[in-house]
Image: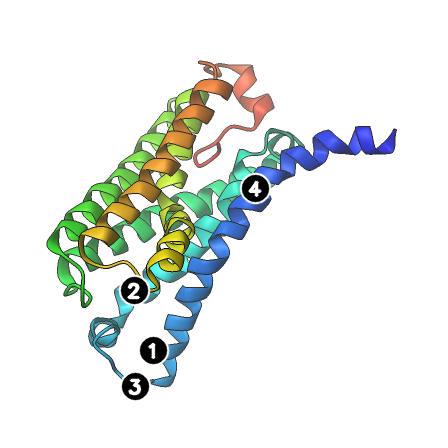
């Protein structure tokens, strides 16, 4: 009986737990890169651009890590209802963190030289999805200011889906590595990274259409729900 009662609780936490786990690899890789920059490790063709201009990549790593690790908890309905105060505070942190991560990523895409083996098409791909993340967050913020809860949630889900691209890219790259014995490069990397982003976006759109119904809060309902900028 206790197992039946706890089952819905476990299922509600399955998705955010999975999203946090997906974030482990890119967050760990970012932490390792920051440590490399801090100790002044040997400069190689792969990291030379980061040593030449470390601030953008450090800002991107920190803000993207905060956004990807805390973001999943904003999408748990029960957690939002039980802790509306935490949800609002976290939202005010996550929106600027996500937007800063997206803008720092765009800066790096535009001004960092390409890594060895990368092609110009990859730069264009990053610009498209980085811009999509920034626009999604801005539209999500605008929606909550207009008290359009459904549209706010939809755009926040889309923005988070794009942000989680790095985690999914690692997952889709593993089969390639096992089959070929080497990391993807050139057009293969473009296709794998694009596929990862599109997988995330497809899942996000499925969730939006399955779970979110049009709903606007007006008057007293807004106060009782604790709706403020940055909530989801």
Image mark for residue 16: 4
- Mark 4, Cα crowd under 10 Å, few <14 / some 14-19 / many 20+, is some
Looking at the rendered image, the disc whose residue lies closer to the viewer, 1 or 3, is 3
Label 3 element class: loop
Residue with the mark numbered 3? 42
Closest to the observer, 229 or 123: 123
Q: How far is disc 4 from disc 3 in space, using C-alphas?
A: 37 Å
Residue 230 image position (x, y, % from top left): 44, 37
First in sequence, mark 4 or 2: give its number: 4
Quadrant of res 59 = bottom left
Looking at the rendered image, the disc whose residue lies closer to the viewer, 3 or 2, is 3
Q: How far is disc 2 from disc 1 in space, using C-alphas?
A: 10 Å
Residue 141 visible in the current orientation = yes
In this figure, which colouring scheme has been used for the structure? rainbow
Residue with the mark numbered 2? 57
How many marks on residues?
4
- Mark 1, Cα crowd under 10 Å, few <14 / some 14-19 / many 20+, is some
Residue 42 image position (x, y, % from top left): 30, 86
Q: How far is disc 4 from disc 2 in space, using C-alphas?
A: 26 Å
Contact between marks 2 and 1 (CB within 8 A): the answer is yes
First in sequence, mark 1 or 3: give its number: 1
């Amino acid at each position: 009986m206790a197992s039946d009662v706890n089952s819905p609780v476990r299922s509600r936490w399955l998705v955010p737990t999975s999203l946090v786990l997906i974030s482990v690899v890119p967050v760990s890789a970012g932490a390792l890169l920051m440590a490399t920059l801090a100790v002044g490790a040997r400069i190689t063709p792969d990291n030379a651009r980061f040593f030449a201009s470390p601030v953008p990549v450090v800002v991107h790593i920190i803000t993207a890590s905060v956004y990807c690790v805390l973001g999943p908890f904003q999408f748990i309905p029960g957690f939002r209802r039980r802790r509306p105060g935490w949800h609002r505070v976290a939202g005010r942190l996550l929106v600027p963190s996500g937007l800063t991560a997206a803008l720092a990523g765009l800066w790096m895409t535009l001004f960092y030289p390409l890594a060895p083996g990368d092609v110009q098409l990859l730069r264009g791909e990053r610009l498209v999805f980085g811009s999509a993340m920034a626009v999604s967050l801005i539209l999500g913020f605008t929606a909550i200011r207009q008290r359009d809860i459904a549209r706010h949630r939809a755009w926040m889900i889309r923005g988070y889906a794009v942000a989680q691209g790095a985690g999914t890219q690692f997952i889709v790259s593993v089969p390639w590595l096992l089959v070929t014995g080497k990391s993807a490069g050139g057009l293969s990397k473009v296709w794998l990274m694009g596929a990862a982003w599109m997988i995330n976006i497809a899942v996000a759109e499925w969730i939006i259409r399955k779970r979110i119904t049009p709903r606007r809060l007006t008057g007293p309902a807004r106060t009782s729900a604790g709706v403020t900028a940055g909530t989801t």
